[in-house]
Amino acid sequence: MIEIRTYDGDPGELAAFCTGHWRDRYGGKMAIPLWGGPLMDWMFFSEDPGARDLLVAAYDGTRLVGTLPQKTVQFQLHGKPIVGSFGSFFTIDPAYENQGISLKMVLEQRRRHRERQVPLTAGYLIRGESVSMGRHFWLRLREMHVVAKAGLWARLIDHRVMSDFLFHPIEKYGTRAIGWIQGPPKRTAPSVGIRPYRETDLADCLRLANEVSKAAEFGLVWDETSLGRQLSHKEFPRTIVAEHGGRVAGFVNYFLQEYLGRHEMLAGVIDLLSVSELPPDARKRLLRTALSQMAAEGCHSSLFLRVAGQPAYLLSRMGFIPEVPHYDFVIQSMAPDAPVVKTRRLHALWR
């Protein structure tokens, strides 16, 4: 008998379940992330009270057969605070996919959201990939609506690996051509005023992160707890800061993520970038340092969600190219009084 309850395993088991079934279903058909235990631990498994409240899963006895994990986050809509959640990693064991598990988990999430007065949840749907099954399921729900198309900035580090990784011929040949013209990012030595993040930098980084959020009409709002975890957690995320005028005036925060296309590749995924308080030369040095560090860590590309408040001119100068949107940013209303979000100016993370 199928039981819908709170996930009771560890981060490694959750990662293995999601990644394993995504690989079996989509491997060789479209690019997919290969999630690991450290990522799941970073996102979901804090010691805060209620941290597991929205980790909904389906079990057949002790066997995990479905996951719909979400986490509570703080949003702002036109400057007004809203409690919400963010979800991804929706996975069903193919042997159980015709037993109504998906809808049962959605209804349980809705119940839990209403019980905790969390009126909405946000996430992404894949565009343009006919093999992706999630989109067909989610858009049948009348509470789900598409807010905006979402695309990435991409900076090639190893264009040969990236060309081999991609499925579509036009993208493969375009990647090779860009690589020949652009070349890899230049390795750079440590620069004065640019260094790894320390816990004492949190107050400055909090100011900077929320300034980025203010550039959006709808987006994340950070506090000391959420941003502290985002910037530094068991050496999983990497954060580099830049000092100016005696304080931290900019930072870049990223993590390493493996993907499977035709082959595997490693990306440095930038979550947060703040440079508005830095002079132009320091902005370039900060981003150049981050790209150099990614290259030293074996990354083949750097990826960054195109959201409000980003320095588009700087990113272009540093070799980032805006890709065609491959995702839809979606919001599901979890309560009758949930606010309607209509905007394209987002501040969000890409998962």
Image (cartoon, grey):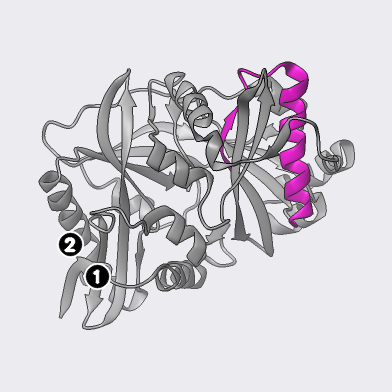
Q: Residues within 10 Å of mark 1 (few under 14, many from 20)?
A: many
Q: Which residues are magenta?
A: 270-298
- The residue drawn where x is 44% and y is 23% is 345
* 266 horizontally vs 229: left or right: right
Q: Please state the horizontal and vertical placement of residue 19, each as a whole percent of the image.
A: 48, 68
Residue 329 vertical position relative to residue 244 in the rendered view, above or below: below
Residue 244 vertical position relative to residue 19 in the rendered view, above or below: above
Magenta run includes residue 280: yes
Q: Quadrant of residue 164?
A: bottom right
Q: Quadrant of residue 118?
A: top left
Q: Return the residue at label 1.
A: 58
Q: Secondary structure at mark 2?
A: helix
Residue 67 vertical position relative to residue 172 in the rendered view, above or below: below
Q: Quadrant of residue 210?
A: top left
Q: Return the residue at label 2.
A: 104
Q: Secondary structure at mark 1?
A: strand
State whether residue 325 appears in this view: no
Q: Which callout, 2 or 1, points at the residue further toward the start of the chain?
A: 1
Look at label 2 and name its amino acid.
Answer: Lys
Label 2 close to label 1 by CB (< 8 Å): yes
Front-lying residue, 208 or 152: 208
The quadrant of the image that shows the N terminus is bottom left
* 298 horizontally vs 74: left or right: right
Residue 142 vertical position relative to residue 319 in the rendered view, above or below: below
Look at label 1 and name its amino acid.
Answer: Ala
Count of marks placed on residues: 2
- The residue drawn where x is 58% and y is 25% is 310
